[in-house]
Structures are given as C-alpha cells and as structure tokens.
Amino acid sequence: MDFEQFYRCYSVSSIGKPHAENGDKIIMPPSALHRLVWGPQVAYPMLFQLNNPNSESGRVTHCGVLEFVADEGFVFLPSWMMHNLLLQEGNLVHVKSQSLGKGTYVKLQPHAKDFLDISNPKAALETALRSYSCLTIGDTIMLPYNSKKYYINIIETKPSSAICIVDTDCEVDFAPPLDYVEPEKKPAPSTLPTKRPQEVEEDEQETPEKIAKFSPFTGSARRLDGEPVLTQSVPPAVPSPPELKQRQLESENGTNKKGSKSSASASLQHSGKLVFGSNVNRPANAIPKVAPNNRSRQEPPHKAEEPKLQAFTGKKYTLKG
C-alpha cells in the first residue's frame, strides 16, 4: 500500500533553514517515516508526488525528503516549489509516495541570458543539481550561483515526464533563454559603385559632342640633329584638258623618235636575252647628272676646343708653412 497523506505546508525559511531552499527536498513529520519504514514496500531513494488539491490547474511536481523533524500535520517545502504549485503559507498539499525511473536526457531553458555569462555553466549546473532528486516537465527550478539566483525551466525529460537524477548519467541540453533575441541579419553590402544624384544628372547631360574624339599623330615634327623641319611642297596644279592633249601629242612624238634609235641598239644584243642596266644608248663620256638639292644644309658652327686636363698643376705647400 502506497504512502498518501494531506499536510499543511509552509516554506523551509519559516523554520530557520534557508539552505533547504537550494534543492527539491522537503521536511516531513516523524509519523511519515514510521509508516514508510514499516510499510510493505520501501523504495530508495524515497520520492514523493505533490499536488495542490485546491487548484484547478492540475499541476504536479516531484521531490525527495530531507528530514523527518516537522510537527505532526505539517510539511515544509522550498519556496520555488510552493510557487510552482500555486500554494500559499498554510494551504493543504497532497503528498504521495512515487517511484521514478532513471533519467537519460533533460532539456533546460534559462529565464535570463545572464546565465550564459557564467564562466563555466556546466560545472555550475552539476554542482547545483546535486541538491535535486528528480525533475518534472513544467517545473521551474532555482540555481544559486555567486549570491545570485538563476531560474530555469524543465521543458523536456526522457524516458518519462518525471525522472530521477540520483546516481545516473544524464545528458543535458540547453534551449535559448526566454529573453534572448536573435540579432537582425544585415544585408550584404553591394559591390557596385553608387553615384550621388548630382553625378547622375551630370552624366545624363553629357552629349557625344562634348566627348573629344581621338586623333592620332597630331604632334609637331622635330629632327634629331636640331635643324628646322621644311614644310611639305605644295602639289602641282592640275593642268586643264587642252594642255593635257598637247602633252600627250608631244609624248607620242618623243616615243617614236626614241623607238628608231632603240631598234638599232637592240640588233646588237643577243635575241631572247634581257640586259639590265645596259649602257648601249649612253655615251662613254657622259657623266650622270645629279638632281640638285633644293635644301642647303647649314653646317653647325664649330665648338671652341675645351682646354685639356692637366694633372697636378696646383701650388705646393709644406706643413711648416
């Protein structure tokens, strides 16, 4: 037969035991120990199920026992446990013995992101959970660290909704804190160059006429010897049609005369051969004429001869003076 009893509940701080606030242990009267020991079945560690009979929420939690020294008809609970069950000082609470399986997984959610600022949250959590015997989904436990209280929600447990964490290896996972806000994703900066409105207007106002075309070889000519560059000669004037006809007639008459002379010289040459640079028609004493040079180069003035260097031509001096 399971142990089951109604008690008046008060906080453990009311009897001068504030250290009992750090955990899930309750203080029960000695009569409860007598019934548990002499009962038909006793399971260790002793675990209990608590619920508020006057609450319609149906909240249930589980706990262990710290001592059996309370007055008869009374039970003392940690403040956070009374808050979870919506209990006030002196309210009735239903206590029932319970057997829970070993936990393998638990997921926790801190109330504030300050919990993440702890230098080693895993070690702090392991130390704080030594004061707990079991965990129940929906509970909010309190972890003291460096004179500060951190409240944590139990949002998932395996293999059941309530587990025992005494002498067991349990995997612990964390959910983001309740007040955690994800940072907004900033848009990636564009790599395209941006123009100011004034520059855009100037680009629109530009026309092809304003853009200068590239003209090659527009520089001035210079000679390496420093002489002035002569200007190009003016092309001869095109003759009128009557003058062209007269020149054509003169050229035809000239070619006929030259043809008679060239035929005589050609008979002296061997037939079927070409002789380049032949001097047959050229007189022996003829001197090739050279076209006069219209440009007269001016010889650069002779530079004055510089005096040659003569070594050791200075005055001599002695140390004696």
Image: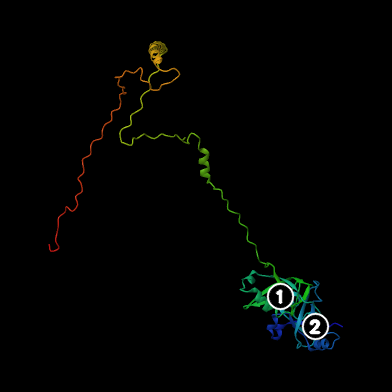
Disc 1 to disc 2, C-alpha distance? 22 Å
Residue 241: where, in percent of width, then height?
A: 42, 12
Q: Which quadrant of the view contains residue 173?
A: bottom right
Left or right, 257 with reference to 92 = left
Amino acid tagged 1 = Ile
Local secondary structure at mark 1: strand
On screen, residue 28 above or below 227: below
Residue on which the image places disc 1: 141
Label 1 close to label 2 by CB (< 8 Å): no
- First-in-chain label (1 vs 2): 2
The label on residue 7 is: 2
Residue at image coords 50%, 41%:
202
Q: Position of residue 50 (x, y in %)?
A: 79, 78
Q: Which mark is residue 17?
A: none
Label 1 neighbour load within 10 Å: few <14, some 14-19, many 20+: many
Q: Is residue 108 above or below residue 18?
A: above
Q: Quadrant of residue 175?
A: bottom right
Where in the figure is residue 229, as x and y percent of width and height?
33, 31
Amino acid type at mark 2: Tyr
